[in-house]
Image (cartoon, grey):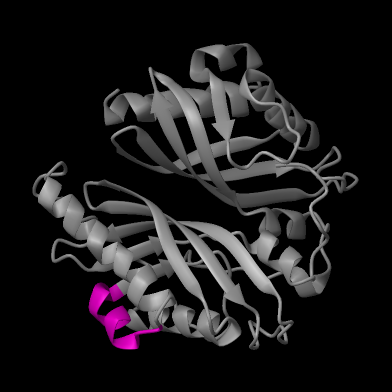
């Protein structure tokens, strides 16, 4: 499939299955051996697994609606960034209905095979969602990052959106965020790869960390490495199209320092993250939409309830 066909497949899935609950469309959209890497242990696979997840979600949020914010496609992969809205009038992840409205971000990567979705790696912001419906203790909730007033530089059109050299250059720049930044704490490297007018959209507000300029990436790296001094953040998927790069990474560190007001617990944390980056024509990062498994982190350091099912 072309990139546009992969994007059209995902758009049809959001419109038909998520927003309208048309589960009879699932066999036309998914392969019979579909694998969801976010499924809870013991969940069914294939068509039954897809149907069960979204029936559960629509049972908890009958008016759920997803807006597609961005799609980036390369080869057999399409990365997606969406915003979900819904009212919690049914039980969710073992919690009784709250009647509260919620808005949350979700990012994912889908592998497409033979015109259907064959594999999925997801990153819904469940910490923000559960916090809004009152299902978490206050100490487990990270403060919201309001970036609505920030104005990033206008889109910079790529000279050739499919130029392999440009795509590989952009991937190499993004990889440095993880290798030189979060895994090594190299502040000079952070300043090199981020534009002066860089704008960050983090999943949570890390107190005094700026949201613009090189100091934003430097501050985020500093906060995470203070809390997890042995932190490593290794990329396992990179998807590039035009001036955009999407990275999925595996994040591992021991909570041996203070982290956003949480005293050290000495516990090992292993989570994943999916981040969308936009680069300028000179090859520096101008914007990022970030996410990591914040709920998994809070569960592993003992501040949030252990998983009780759900997706």
Above-or-below relation of 31 to 37: above
Q: Position of residue 27 (x, y in %)?
A: 56, 13
Residue visible at 30% across and 70% down? 176
Q: Residue furthest left?
A: 159
- Residue at position x 61%, y 64% from top? 270
Q: Which region shows up in magenta?
A: 185-197
User: Could you tell me residue 277's position as x and y percent?
Assistant: 34, 59
**What percent of the width, then of the height, locates residue 210?**
45, 82
Is 108 in the magenta? no
Q: Is residue 10 visible?
A: yes
Residue at 40% over, 27% down: 112
Direction right: furthest residue: 96
Residue occupying the point 50% across, 32% down: 119
Q: From what the image shows, is residue 186 above or below residue 108?
A: below
* Vertical side of 41 occupied by 51: above or below: above
Residue 212 visible at all: no
Picture quadrant of residue 177: bottom left
Point out the image quarter for the C terminus: top right
Near-viewer residue (281 or 171): 171
Residue 192 is one of the magenta-drawn residues: yes
Q: Is residue 121 left or right of 184 when viewed as pictured? A: right
Above or below, 234 relative to 22: below
Count of residue discs: 0
Q: Nearer the viewer, residue 42 or 64?
A: 42
On screen, residue 294 versus residue 119, left or right, reads right
- The image quadrant of residue 56 is top right
Point out the image quarter for the N terminus.
Answer: top left
Q: Nearer the viewer, residue 185 or 275?
A: 185
The quarter of the picture where residue 37 lies is top right
Give x and y (percent) for residue 141: 72, 69
């Amino acid at each position: 499939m072309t990139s546009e066909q992969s994007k059209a497949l995902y758009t049809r899935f959001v419109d038909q299955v998520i927003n309208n609950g048309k589960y009879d469309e699932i066999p036309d959209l998914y392969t019979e051996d579909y694998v969801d890497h976010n499924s809870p242990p013991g969940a069914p696979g294939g068509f039954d697994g897809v149907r069960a997840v979204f029936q559960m979600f629509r049972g908890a949020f009958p008016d759920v609606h997803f807006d597609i914010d961005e799609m980036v496609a390369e080869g057999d992969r399409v990365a997606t960034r969406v915003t979900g809205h819904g009212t919690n009038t049914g039980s969710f992840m073992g919690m009784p209905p709250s009647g509260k409205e919620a808005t949350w971000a979700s990012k994912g990567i889908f592998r497409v095979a033979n015109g259907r979705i064959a594999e999925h790696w997801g990153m819904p912001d469940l910490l923000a969602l559960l916090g809004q419906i009152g299902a978490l203790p206050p100490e487990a909730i990270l403060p919201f990052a309001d970036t609505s007033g920030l104005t990033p530089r206008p889109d910079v059109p790529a000279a050739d959106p499919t130029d392999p050299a440009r795509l590989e250059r952009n991937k190499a720049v993004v990889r440095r965020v993880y290798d030189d930044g979060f895994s090594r704490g190299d502040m000079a490297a952070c300043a090199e790869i981020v534009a002066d007018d860089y704008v960050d959209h983090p999943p949570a507000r890390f107190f005094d960390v700026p949201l613009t300029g090189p100091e934003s990436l430097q501050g985020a790296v500093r906060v995470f490495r203070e809390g997890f001094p042995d932190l490593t953040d290794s990329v396992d998927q990179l998807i590039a199209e035009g001036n955009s790069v999407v990275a999925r990474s595996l994040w591992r560190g021991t909570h041996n320092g203070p982290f956003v007001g949480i005293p050290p617990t000495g516990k090992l944390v292993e989570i994943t993250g999916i981040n969308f980056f936009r680069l300028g024509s000179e090859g520096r990062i101008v914007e990022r939409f970030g996410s990591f498994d914040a709920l998994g982190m809070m569960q592993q350091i003992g501040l949030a309830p252990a998983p009780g099912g759900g997706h």
